[in-house]
Image (cartoon, rainbow, N blue to C red):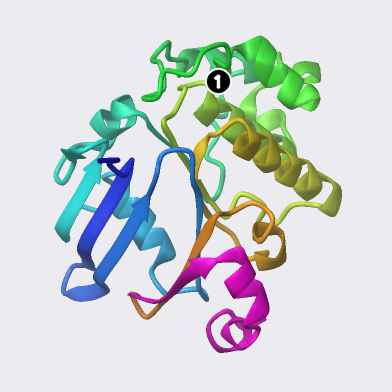
Amino acid sequence: MNVDLLACRSLKARYGSSQVLFGVDLSIARGEVVSLLGRNGMGKSTAIKSVVGLLPNIDGEIEFQGKRINGLKPDAIARLGVAIVPEGRRCFPNLTVHEHLVAFASRRLTSDERVGIAWTPSRLYELFPRLAERKKNLGNQLSGGEQQMLAIARALSTQPALLILDEATEGLAPLIREQIWECLHLLRREGQTTLVVDKYVDRLLDIADRHLILERGRVVWEGNSNQLSADRSLWTRYLAL
């Protein structure tokens, strides 16, 4: 029997006394790309924080590669093979581009033991040539788009079994945003398991295998790209598009 790479069951989360998630079920199979959709404040970032260990006030079950990870520290979850590209990029201002790519590098094989696709610095520079040009620059010397490329490259340097992207195209110039979409298409072709949050639903239709819509902390719809594209009432009702 195939085991989902990530499985959240009846996930509940709260900030203090305020409950934000109300029994969310979320599963991602190995090699699958899943998008988490919804308007602002509906619980998408809270769900991500719960998965990566940044929000301790949770109930329900979270399993990664068949292992329960509830209560683990973020660094322990990262070492298991979960990498996040956080909203806001969070590049280190006092590290160069190249130092970002070697400081967090891992030789860990992905769980399906794929061969020949390790994200070395040289391969990451091929993915984002602009970073190669800026490899000696500090994090605070980069533009917003360059920082986003670096945040993605840094996450890939850990050889993640699961890559999570939280609003990776937010606030970027159209040309840079297009480069990020091209990167996501490449990762999909290479079989990178990915959970992505983004407001550009039309672009996610070509990338994600499945989509989940959150509304007030609950999953109100789940389906594939053909189903989401065909029912535009979902876009206006839940996504304000």
Residue at 55% x, 20% y is 100
- Along the line of sight, the residue nearer the viewer: 35 or 225: 225
Residue at 60% x, 73% y is 228
Left/right of residue 140 with respect to residue 104 in the rendered view? right
Above/below status of 167 relative to 121:
below
Which amino acid type corresponds to the residue marked 1 in the rendered image? Answer: His
Find residue 133 and report its horizontal and vertical position in percent: 81, 18
Find residue 50 and report its horizontal and vertical position in percent: 28, 53
- Along the line of sight, the residue nearer the viewer: 137 or 216: 216
Res. 137 in view = no
Please identify the quarter of the rendering in which residue 30 is found: top left
Find residue 237 and report its horizontal and vertical position in percent: 56, 89
Residue at 59% x, 73% y is 227
- In the picture, the quarter occupied by the N terminus is top left
- Is 228 covered by the magenta stretch? yes
Judging by the rendered image, the residue that carries numbered circle 1 is: 100
Please identify the quarter of the rendering in which residue 29 is found: top left
Please identify the quarter of the rendering in which residue 113 is found: top left
Above/below status of 118 relative to 61:
above
Left/right of residue 91 with respect to residue 3 in the rendered view? right
Above/below status of 234 relative to 189:
below
- Along the line of sight, the residue nearer the viewer: 122 or 14: 122
Instruction: Kindly state the secondary structure of the residue where label 1 is placed.
Output: helix
How packed mark 1 is, by other alpha carbons closer than 10 Å (few <14, some 14-19, many 20 or more), is: many
- Along the line of sight, the residue nearer the viewer: 15 or 181: 181
Res. 135 in view = yes
Outermost residue toward the front in this view: 1
Residue at 31% x, 44% y is 4
- Is 236 covered by the magenta stretch? yes
Looking at the rendering, the stretch of residues picked out in magenta corresponds to 218-241
- In the picture, the quarter occupied by the C terminus is bottom right
Find residue 140 and report its horizontal and vertical position in percent: 65, 32
